[in-house]
Image: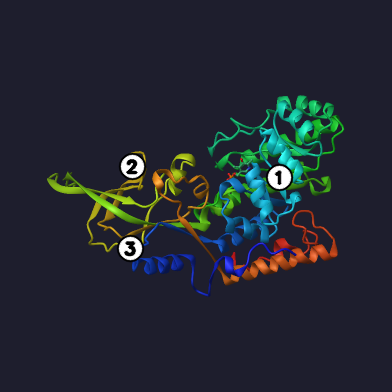
């Protein structure tokens, strides 16, 4: 049984001590020194909770984590440790996931438009599951990866998503028959259908519509003699703690749709490719005020209509939109700063703005904030900074990426050991439960999805 992560890879949070406490401890420590760089605390225990919640909420679905969302080592290690699969979109992502010891069967190369050399790389390294949505890809694959197991990515109605994807990927239903016919002629194996409802999906019904569309494609495929056995319902699940209800609504739509269109008796395996769901809330970022500028303004008293002199304050901090806050541009995020100490009610508030450290005027994190006066050396915290942040952060202007401190509570670590044990038993017994390989029927209370979710950490 491989071990993907060790106790020495993270800081163990003993009872009662949480990730926020660790953050404050680090701040206190560095405040005595000259090293006040911005830093992340990544609570791997939060990812453990998310995983258990996912298994509980979607018992027929095996998650393949979308690596592009956050490829930090601790993240992929803890997910591998819990038996998740991985959605990779490039050679480098496949290399990363294989370097931590993940088997090829737990990887799907879910990029419908791939460079030929990278298709060959997948072939050389045993990665067989790959997606496609066009004819040219089929001829590339038939030449460069004859053993590939192809998954047909279909388009979705993603107009309600913050990051639509179907403008770039996904075959419309009406071209699927032709693609399947072409695949048959080229002797390419097509094993199933995938879709992505768009990242930040706010309309749960889209999943049901896409699952029903996928059923149609399964029927079409059988006309060409394909016995498809894989349905991949993609990503799009929300990951912030304040979006738990939406996640539950989405699952309440997916489960009956699966039972209707892909009942268990159909034998179809179901996977998903959640990205932000797993990591959004696990990462918090601390940034330090490195500079400050006051702008004098006249302020109109709302009660008496009098004009008073006041000031706007600009704070310059040591991470910005070219670093972790790239999510403002690429992921339509609106990060909200949290103060270490709550201001007392009698402290005056000033209209304030937050700027990154680079010399670009575009490097603005937030504005129109009402904040008490803060000083150089003070800290801001940002929650929900795990999705589409560190992955796209650059070192523009010579500002380095913020360091990540990994942490996990002991109770989460123990839950991981339990999960591990369950997975271990499987390999000895060689009995297979259809989605998590735990060795038990889904209905059996001993099945991983129910028994290894200690109530106190959910
Ligand atoms: C980005 C992406 C995902 C992950 O999407 P989330 O909305 O973060 O869950 C999954 N699958 C594919 C093919 C993607 O491109």
Q: Please tell me whether mark 2 or mark 3 is closer to you in this view.
A: 2
Which residue carries the number 1 mark?
108
Secondary structure under tag 2 reads: loop
Secondary structure under tag 3 reads: loop
Q: How did the renderer colour the structure?
A: rainbow
Horizontal side, residue 95 vs residue 280: left or right: right
Q: Residue at x 71, y 41 (%)?
A: 121
Q: Residues within 10 Å of mark 1 (few under 14, many from 20)?
A: many
Q: Is mark 3 within 8 Å of ligand 1?
A: no
Q: Please tell me whether mark 3 or mark 1 is closer to you in this view.
A: 1
For the N terminus, which image quadrant? bottom right
Q: Residue at x 71, y 54 (%)?
A: 102
Q: Please tell me whether mark 2 or mark 1 is closer to you in this view.
A: 2
Which residue carries the number 2 mark?
359
Q: Residue 409: in sight, yes or no? A: yes
For the C terminus, which image quadrant? bottom right
Q: Residue at x 48, y 52 (%)?
A: 385
Give the image location of residue 219, x and y in percent: 81, 33
How far apart marks 2 and 1 lie (CA) works out to: 40 Å
Q: Is residue 298 above or below residue 429?
A: above
Q: Quadrant of residue 358?
A: top left
Q: Residue furthest right?
A: 225
Q: Residues within 10 Å of mark 3 (few under 14, many from 20)?
A: few
Horizontal side, residue 168 vs residue 289: left or right: right
Query: Which of pointers 3 and 1 lies earlier in the amino acid sequence?
Result: 1
Q: Quadrant of residue 174?
A: top right
Q: Residue at x 45, y 49 (%)?
A: 324
Q: Is residue 418 above or below residue 280?
A: below
How far apart marks 2 and 3 lie (CA) works out to: 31 Å
Give the image location of residue 303, x and y in percent: 17, 48
Q: Quadrant of residue 184?
A: top right
Which residue carries the number 3 mark?
342
């Amino acid at each position: 049984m491989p071990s993907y992560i060790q106790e020495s890879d993270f800081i163990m949070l003993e009872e009662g001590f949480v990730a926020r406490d660790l953050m404050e401890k680090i701040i206190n420590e560095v405040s005595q020194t000259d090293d006040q760089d911005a830093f992340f605390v990544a609570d791997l225990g939060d990812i453990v909770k998310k995983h258990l919640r996912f298994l509980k909420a979607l018992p027929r679905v095996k998650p393949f984590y979308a690596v592009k969302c956050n490829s930090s080592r601790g993240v992929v290690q803890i997910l591998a440790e819990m038996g998740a699969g991985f959605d990779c979109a490039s050679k480098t992502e496949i290399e990363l996931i294989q370097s931590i010891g993940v088997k090829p069967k737990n990887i799907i190369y879910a990029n419908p438009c791939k460079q030929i050399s990278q298709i060959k790389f997948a072939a050389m390294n045993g990665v067989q599951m790959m997606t496609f949505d066009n004819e040219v890809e089929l001829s590339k694959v038939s030449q460069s990866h004859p053993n590939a197991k192809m998954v047909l990515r279909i388009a979705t109605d993603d107009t309600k998503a913050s990051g639509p994807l179907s403008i770039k990927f996904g075959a419309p239903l009406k071209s699927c028959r032709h693609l399947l016919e072409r695949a048959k002629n080229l002797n390419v194996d097509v094993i199933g259908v995938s879709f992505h409802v768009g990242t930040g999906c706010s309309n749960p019904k889209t999943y049901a519509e896409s699952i029903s569309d996928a059923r149609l494609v399964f029927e079409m495929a059988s006309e060409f003699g394909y016995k498809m056995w894989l349905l991949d319902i993609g990503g799009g699940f929300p990951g912030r703690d304040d979006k738990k209800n939406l996640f539950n609504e989405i699952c309440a739509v997916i489960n009956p749709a699966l039972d209707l269109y892909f009942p268990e008796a159909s034998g179809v395996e179901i996977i998903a490719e959640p990205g932000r769901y797993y990591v959004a809330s696990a990462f918090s970022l601390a940034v330090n005020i490195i500079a400050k500028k006051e702008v004098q303004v006249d302020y109109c008293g709302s009660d008496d209509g009098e004009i008073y002199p006041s000031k706007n304050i600009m704070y310059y901090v040591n991470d910005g939109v070219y670093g972790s806050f790239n999510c403002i541009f690429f992921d339509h995020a609106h990060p909200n700063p949290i103060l270490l100490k709550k201001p007392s009610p009698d402290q005056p508030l000033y209209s304030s703005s937050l700027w990154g450290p680079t010399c670009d005027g575009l490097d603005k994190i937030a504005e129109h904030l009402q904040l008490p006066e803060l000083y150089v050396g003070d800290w801001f915290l940002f929650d929900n900074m795990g999705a589409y942040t560190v992955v796209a952060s650059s070192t523009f202007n010579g500002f380095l990426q913020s360091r990540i401190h990994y942490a996990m509570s002991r109770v989460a670590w123990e839950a991981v050991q339990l999960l591990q044990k369950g997975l271990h038993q499987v390999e000895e017994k060689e009995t297979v439960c259809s989605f998590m390989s735990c060795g038990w029927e889904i209905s059996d209370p001993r099945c991983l999805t129910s028994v290894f979710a200690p109530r106190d950490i959910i």
